[in-house]
Image (tube, rainbow, N blue to C red):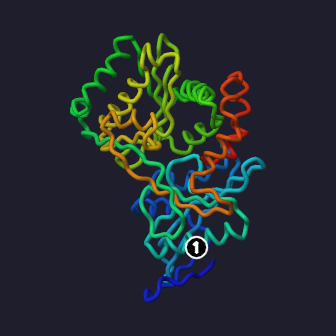
């Protein structure tokens, strides 16, 4: 446990070290903090280990009375191709330190010290809120959030733009159907892995979604849109507090123009969220100005800035591994791989890319 003095005049000594408490202590603290997300929960440690084989470093800050005043979940991502990264949280949209300002600074100081000592290529902290840090910050990503009429799907429907409502009616008229449930994990992954291959990007392993489902059975939603009994669009959503985030969503291009199954997919998740009394539907992160950003904005979703802080051993900005990986993997070549090969080989490559 390392002691770190608080700011001049604060009179505080913050002690930082590995978290040694119980999972419920961690989760109770997280739930009470500004900027907390589902991805800060203790159970993601087991998910990362099971799905990718990655170790987690859970840092805790205690004040001079022994009170827990800050936490920082970090995951160590190492590969021959892409180097050594410490990320909070890799493969996910959010992370970063939680707690009071002194604790946040102390946690990040300790993480930065460890990253330098271990010659980590990049330390990256993906926060949903602005933090009092001196690290370089990337503002290239936003998340898109739609406010719902909690408990009232009809009012939620009426608040959508008419063009969106007409877009949802199209798949309904074409006979596209929706199914929700844990049994939709397999068709979800079928669509997801196929779409990722078409985009030229290695997909996560199915083991990731199986681990999430086992670790957080009450928080994960799988939904799939079917065209003539064939999975055509699917998504995995994570519920936290009064919000559901569509963390992973995909649609097969062959059906986009003729059936628009993704429109019914998104509406069905939004409708379900309203039925469950949730107040917000989170479309997930995107880059402003991109096609994905335009699609989400059409639903009258509002932007929330994401704050990705980083410290790099090389000239790589926070989030830069995404650009590096895209160049190294050759997406044009990847798109032409047989689906079975891409699905089989992809996870071994993807585990080293924390984007």
Q: Position of residue 162 (x, y in %)?
A: 25, 26
Secondary element under disc 1, as helix, strand or loop, is: helix
- Please give the residue where the numbered disc 1 appears in the rendered image: 109
- Please determine whether, in this image, residue 119 is positioned above or below residue 1: above
In the image, 100 versus 212, the foreground residue is 100
Q: Position of residue 23 (x, y in %)?
A: 54, 59
In percent of the image, x 31 and y 26: which residue is there?
164
Q: Residue furthest right?
A: 80
Q: Position of residue 204 (x, y in %)?
A: 63, 37
In percent of the image, x 23 and y 33: which residue is there?
159
In percent of the image, x 30 and y 44: which residue is there?
279
In the image, 188 versus 87, the foreground residue is 87
Number of labels in the image equals 1
Q: Position of residue 170 (x, y in %)?
A: 35, 16
In the image, 144 versus 28, the foreground residue is 144
In the image, 126 versus 297, the foreground residue is 297
Q: Quadrant of the N terminus?
A: bottom right
- Please determine whether, in this image, residue 250 is positioned above or below residue 349: above
What crowding class fits label 1: few (fewer than 14 Cα within 10 Å), some (14-19), or many (20 or more)? some
Q: Quadrant of residue 275?
A: top left
In this picture, residue 108 sits left or right of residue 169: right
């Amino acid at each position: 446990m390392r002691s770190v003095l608080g700011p001049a005049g604060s009179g505080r000594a913050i002690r930082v070290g590995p978290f040694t408490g119980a999972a419920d202590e961690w989760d109770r603290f997280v739930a009470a903090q500004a900027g907390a997300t589902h991805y800060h929960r203790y159970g993601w440690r087991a998910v990362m280990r099971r799905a990718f084989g990655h170790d987690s470093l859970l840092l805790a800050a205690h004040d001079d009375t022994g009170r827990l005043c800050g936490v920082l979940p970090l995951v160590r991502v190492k590969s021959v191709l892409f180097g050594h990264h410490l990320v909070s949280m890799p493969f996910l949209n959010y992370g970063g330190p939680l707690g009071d300002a002194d604790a946040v600074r102390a946690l990040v100081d300790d993480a930065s010290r460890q990253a330098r000592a271990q010659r980590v290529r990049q330390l990256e902290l993906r926060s949903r809120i602005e933090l009092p840090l001196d690290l370089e910050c990337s503002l290239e990503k936003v998340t898109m959030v739609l406010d719902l009429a909690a408990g009232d799907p009809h009012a939620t429907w009426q608040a959508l733009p008419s063009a969106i409502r007409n877009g949802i009616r199209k798949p309904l008229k074409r006979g596209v159907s929706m199914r929700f449930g844990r049994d939709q994990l397999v068709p979800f992954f079928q669509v997801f892995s196929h779409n990722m291959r078409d985009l030229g990007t290695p997909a996560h392993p199915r083991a990731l979604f199986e681990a999430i489902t086992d670790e957080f059975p009450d928080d994960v939603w799988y939904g799939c849109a079917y065209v003539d009994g064939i999975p055509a669009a699917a998504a995995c959503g994570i519920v936290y507090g009064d919000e559901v985030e569509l963390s992973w969503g995909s649609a097969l291009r062959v059906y986009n123009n003729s059936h628009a199954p993704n429109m019914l997919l998104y509406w069905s998740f939004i409708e379900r969220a309203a039925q469950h009394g949730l107040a917000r539907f989170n479309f997930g992160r995107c880059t402003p100005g991109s096609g994905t950003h335009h699609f989400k904005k059409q639903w009258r979703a509002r932007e929330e800035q994401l704050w990705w802080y980083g410290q790099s051993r090389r000239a790589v900005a926070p989030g830069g591994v995404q650009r590096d990986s895209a160049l190294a993997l050759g997406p044009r070549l990847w798109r032409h791989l047989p689906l079975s090969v891409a699905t089989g080989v992809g996870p071994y490559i993807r585990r080293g890319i924390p984007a």
